[in-house]
Amino acid sequence: MKEIAPGGVHVGLDLAQASSWRIGGPADIVVEPENFEQVAAFLRLMGQRPEPVLVIGETTNLFFDSRGFRGVLLRIGPKLAQVSIEGTRVRVQAGARVPELVRQLAEAGLGGISHAGGVPGTIGGLVLMNGGSQRKGIGTHVASVLVADADGTLRRWAPPELGFSYRHSALQGRRAVILEVELELESALPADQIAEIDAIIAERAAKFPLDLPSGGSVFLSDPGMYDVVGPPGRAIETAGLKGLAEGAAQISPKHANFIVNLGTASDDDVLRLIATARNKVRARTGFSMACEVRHVGPDGDLRVAHEVADERWPGLDLSE
C-alpha cells in the first residue's frame, strides 16, 4: 500500500479524533490516494485480499463502532479536490468539500446548487446520497459521474444509470469509488448566489447544533409522515424526547433530529437513542422513522443505523 500511495498510508488512526461524530476506535489502516491511478491500483490490490474495505469522505453521514475498524478505509479527501470550470459545465474531483465548492461556483457566476451551500462533507458523498437541503438534491444538476469499480476499472455513469431519488442513488451499496463529478449548472449573478448561500448558512446555524460533534440529521423526512405529523424533529420533540441523554450522547435540545456527542459518546449511546426515538414515535404515530445516517461495524459492515439499533435494543422498555 505504501508503494501505491507514498505518504498516504496511516496505521492505527483513532477514528474518535478523525470522524465527524467523534466516535470510534482505532482503524487498522487508512489510505489517502492523491490521484485516480492510485485509487485503481489500491482496488486491484484489495480485490486479492480478504480484509474489508470501506470508502469514506468526511464521514458526515456515518459513525463507527467504538471498537474500531478491522480493515482498510479508503479516504477520498483534500488530495482529490481539483475543480475545472468551462462555461456552465464543471468537473470536480470527489474529495472537494461542498461548502467551499458551492461558494467558489457562486463567485464564478454559476447557480443551481446553492441549497447545498451549508451541507458538510465532500461532493462525492453528496452525490452518493443525492444530498442537499430544502428537500432538493444534487442529482438534478449531475451530468455524469466517473467511478472506479471494485476491480479498478474506471467508467463514467450517465444520469439514467445513477437512479437519483430522494437521498438515494444507484451507487449506494456498490463496492465502487466516486472519483469525479460533472455538473451542469446555470448562469447566475454572483451577488445573488452568495446572498442565498449566506442566508442558508445563517438559518442552519440558528436551527442546528453545529457547535457539537454530530452526524447531521439522523432520520429521513418521509413525505407520508411529513403530511400527517410533520418532520422527524417535530415528531421526536412531540414525543417528549428533546434533550434526552444516553451516556454522553444526547438528542439535541436545539433540534430533535440531531444526536450530539457531549464528549465521550459511544456508538451504543447513539444507537440506544435512535431505538428510543423510533419506538416512541412509532407508538404515538404509527410511522417508523428510517435513519439517514449509517453505522460502520468493526468488520466493515455498513448499514442504516436503525437496523443496528433495533438489533442491539430489541423490545426497548419505554417506561424507563
Image: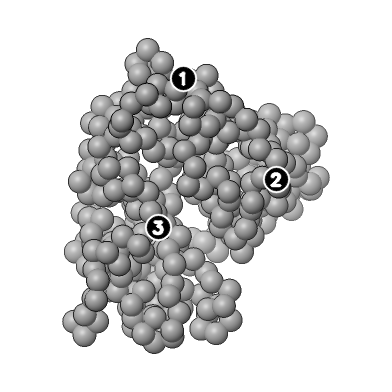
Q: Which residue is mark 1?
A: 41
Seen from the viewer's position, the closer of residues 304 and 116 is 304
Say which amino acid is labelled 3. Val
List x then y, in percent, for residue 27.
Answer: 26, 36
Q: Is residue 191 above or below residue 203?
A: above
**Element at label 3:** strand
- Which mark is first along the chain, 3 or 2? 2
**Element at label 1:** helix
Seen from the viewer's position, the closer of residues 87 and 307 is 307
207 sits left or right of 102 in the view = left
Seen from the viewer's position, the closer of residues 282 and 205 is 282
- Which mark is first along the chain, 2 or 1? 1
Q: Is residue 312 above or below residue 100?
A: below
Q: Is residue 32 above or below residue 110?
A: above
Seen from the viewer's position, the closer of residues 18 and 3 is 3
Q: Residues within 10 Å of mark 1 (few under 14, many from 20)?
A: some
Say which amino acid is labelled 1. Ala
Say which amino acid is labelled 2. Pro
Quarter of the image holding residue 276? bottom left
| Figure quadrant of the C terminus | bottom left
Q: Which residue is mark 2?
A: 159
Q: Residues within 10 Å of mark 2 (few under 14, many from 20)?
A: some
Q: Is residue 183 above or below residue 240?
A: above
Q: Residue at horizontal 22%, vertical 55%?
A: 266
Q: Which residue is mark 3?
A: 304
| Inter-mark Cα distance, 1 to 2 | 27 Å
Q: Are marks 1 and 2 in contact (CB under 8 Å)?
A: no
| Inter-mark Cα distance, 2 to 3 | 25 Å
List x then y, in percent, for residue 144.
Answer: 69, 38
Q: Residue at horizontal 30%, vertical 67%?
A: 310
Q: Residue at horizontal 24%, vertical 82%?
A: 318
Quarter of the image holding residue 8? top left
